């Protein structure tokens, strides 16, 4: 029910933030550990809130076309593995752990992390929770994911570790945020029919599977272009372009989107998109560390 395989979407930006802090000569192992645990806990909370509110809205019950474990939620409620109360307890316990980590960082470091963490928590909660239900608002859900798993998360880690609020970490997180938004986007394709029935009007429901595919391509191009622009501007080291070695995974995902947009063989593209975010982010982090 926590959808642990997706936690790499949080782990990679946290590692990038740690590398940027080390590059600035201000790495603190204790504060980094608190930031890591807090970020992972908040992601678990967001995943379980997502399951809970998608269940309450009827979205997951209406979905028979999901690709486990990539779309359709965790199915933990549908399969009777947990109750609504148990899911809510998991979500709020995870959120409490995140708050405790944030409070510790604020005490030993800077209170700025509380504001950044609160922003991330609100995006995670409001993604599927009414009345905002960002996931149903024609692109706001995808935007929330791109911000939360890119600029906001990298900025939060660097701020937690260094005690300094700066623009560069947020910009450095943009490529990862865009790649993570593509994980969401390709996972929306098999869910689109049932999501439309329950009013979850995300980008694929709004523009159709082919429109979603075009947006996927645009986000992938934007992720790479923004990374190259950061290097050209001297904001991240040229060694970070090592991440481009992960792009064959992007090509694999694009092939799946071209050939299997309307059938279950698309699952290979779902896998490739997750692996692309992971590999690209790890290589980007390594390049920042080496550079």
Image (cartoon, rainbow, N blue to C red):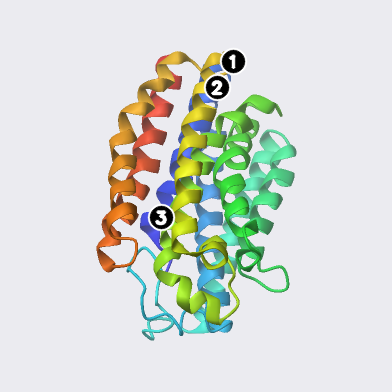
Q: Position of residue 129 (x, y in %)?
A: 65, 71
First in residue order: circle 3 vs circle 2: 3
Q: Mark 2 — residue?
A: 229
Q: Nearer the viewer, residue 222 or 29?
A: 222
Residue 233 is labelled as 1
SS at circle 1 = loop
Q: Nearer the viewer, residue 51 or 115?
A: 51
Residue 117 seen in the current view: yes
Q: Are marks 3 and 1 in contact (CB under 8 Å)?
A: no
Near mark 2 (Cα within 10 A), the count class, few <14, some 14-19 or many ≥20, is few
The quadrant of the picture occupied by the C terminus is: top left
Nearer the observer: mark 3 or 1; the answer is: 1
Residue at screen point 60% across, 77% down: 199
Considering only vertical position in the picture, is 12 above or below 209? above
Cα distance, mark 3 to mark 1? 31 Å
Residue 203 is labelled as none
First in residue order: circle 3 vs circle 1: 3
Cα distance, mark 3 to mark 2? 28 Å
Q: Mark 3 — residue?
A: 6
Near mark 3 (Cα within 10 A), the count class, few <14, some 14-19 or many ≥20, is some
Residue at screen point 34% across, 41% down: 250
Q: Position of residue 212 (x, y in %)?
A: 48, 57
Near mark 1 (Cα within 10 A), the count class, few <14, some 14-19 or many ≥20, is few
The quadrant of the picture occupied by the N terminus is: bottom left
Cα distance, mark 1 to mark 2? 6 Å
Q: Nearer the viewer, residue 252 or 112?
A: 252
Considering only vertical position in the picture, is 159 above or below 193? above
Q: Is residue 286 left or right of residue 88?
A: left
Q: Are marks 1 and 2 in contact (CB under 8 Å)?
A: yes
């Amino acid at each position: 029910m926590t959808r642990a395989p997706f936690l790499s979407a949080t782990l990679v930006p946290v590692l990038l933030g740690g590398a940027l802090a080390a590059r600035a000569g201000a790495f603190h192992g204790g504060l980094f550990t608190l930031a890591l645990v807090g970020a992972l806990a908040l992601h678990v909370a967001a995943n379980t809130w997502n399951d809970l509110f998608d269940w309450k809205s009827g979205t997951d019950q209406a979905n028979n076309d999901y690709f486990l474990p990539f779309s359709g939620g965790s199915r933990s409620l549908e399969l009777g593995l947990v109750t609504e109360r148990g899911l809510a307890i998991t979500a709020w316990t995870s959120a409490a752990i995140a708050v405790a980590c944030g409070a510790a960082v604020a005490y030993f470091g800077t209170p700025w992390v509380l504001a950044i963490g609160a922003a991330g928590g609100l995006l995670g909660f409001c993604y599927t929770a009414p009345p905002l239900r960002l996931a149903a608002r024609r692109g706001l859900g995808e935007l929330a994911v791109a911000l939360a798993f890119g600029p906001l998360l990298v900025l939060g880690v660097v701020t937690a570790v260094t005690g300094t609020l700066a623009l560069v970490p947020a910009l450095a997180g943009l490529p990862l945020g865009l790649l993570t938004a593509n994980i969401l986007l390709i996972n929306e394709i098999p869910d689109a029919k049932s999501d439309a029935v329950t009013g979850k009007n995300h980008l694929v429901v709004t523009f159709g599977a082919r429109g979603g595919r075009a947006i996927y391509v645009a986000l992938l191009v934007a992720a790479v272009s923004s990374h190259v622009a950061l290097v050209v501007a001297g904001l991240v080291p040229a060694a970070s372009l090592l991440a481009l070695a992960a792009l064959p995974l992007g090509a694999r995902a694009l092939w799946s989107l071209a050939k299997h947009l309307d059938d279950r063989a698309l699952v290979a593209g779902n896998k490739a998109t997750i692996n692309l975010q992971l590999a690209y982010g790890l290589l980007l982090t390594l390049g920042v560390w080496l550079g």
